[in-house]
Image: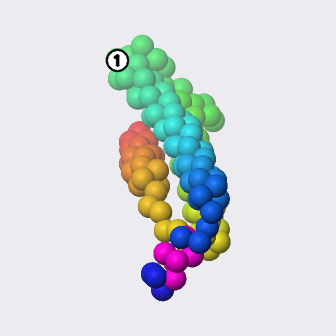
Amino acid sequence: MASQAATSMASIPDATKLALERTRMAHERTLMAWIRTGTSLISFGFTIYKFFQYLREKGEAESSERPFGPRQFALLMISIGLVALLLAGVQHWRYTKKLRERYLEATFSMATIVALMISGLGILALVAVIFRQ
């Protein structure tokens, strides 16, 4: 099977190989852009939560129980960031799968590992906000 894939890739013209590489790199850049967006949402939500927690502990902010306060805002921002990372990861996986089916090239995506690590940090931030009053 490996020799068939190598033979198949060897028979593809150079222009097509370059186009395939550009397409794969475009998918990588798109995933990295979504990772930056998700990271921004997660970190912004967590920062808002910690800032208002600091003000409350210092006594400069009243701890009124509004229906949508800083804690709920932080939960929403972190959740949106995690969902964005999840959807971007699924989209990237589907595109990569289509490329592999058509051209039999198995490339490894470093951006996927970064997305998983950022998602792990986002989950930790979400847990910290949920269980910390």
Q: How is the image coloured?
A: rainbow
Look at 45% across and 81% down and name the residue there: 2
Rendering quarter of residue 50? top left
Look at 51% across and 82% down and name the residue there: 4
In the picture, measured across the screen, residue 42 lies left or right of residue 59, that is right
- Please determine whether, in this image, residue 114 is positioned above or below residue 106: above
Task: Pick the residue in front: 68 or 20.
Answer: 20
- Please determine whether, in this image, residue 13 is positioned above or below residue 35: below
Q: Position of residue 41 (x, y in %)?
A: 54, 36
Q: Quick one: quadrant of the C terminus? A: top left
Direction left: furthest residue: 58
Q: Which residues are magenta?
A: 4-9
Q: Position of residue 107 (x, y in %)?
A: 47, 63
Q: Is residue 66 visible?
A: yes
Direction top: furthest residue: 60
At mark 1, the secondary structure is: helix
- Please determine whether, in this image, residue 42 is positioned above or below residue 109: above
Q: Residues within 10 Å of mark 1 (few under 14, many from 20)?
A: few
Look at 56% across and 40% down and name the residue there: 33
Task: Pick the residue in front: 93 or 38.
Answer: 93
Residue 121 among those drawn in magenta:
no
Q: Position of residue 28 (x, y in %)?
A: 54, 49
Look at 53% across and 26% down and name the residue there: 64
Q: Position of residue 55 (x, y in %)?
A: 41, 19
Q: Is residue 31 visible?
A: no
What amino acid is found at the position of numbered circle 1 in the picture? Lys
Residue at numbered disc 1: 58
Principal secondary structure, stretch drawn in magenta: helix
Direction bottom: furthest residue: 1
Task: Pick the residue in front: 1 or 28.
Answer: 1
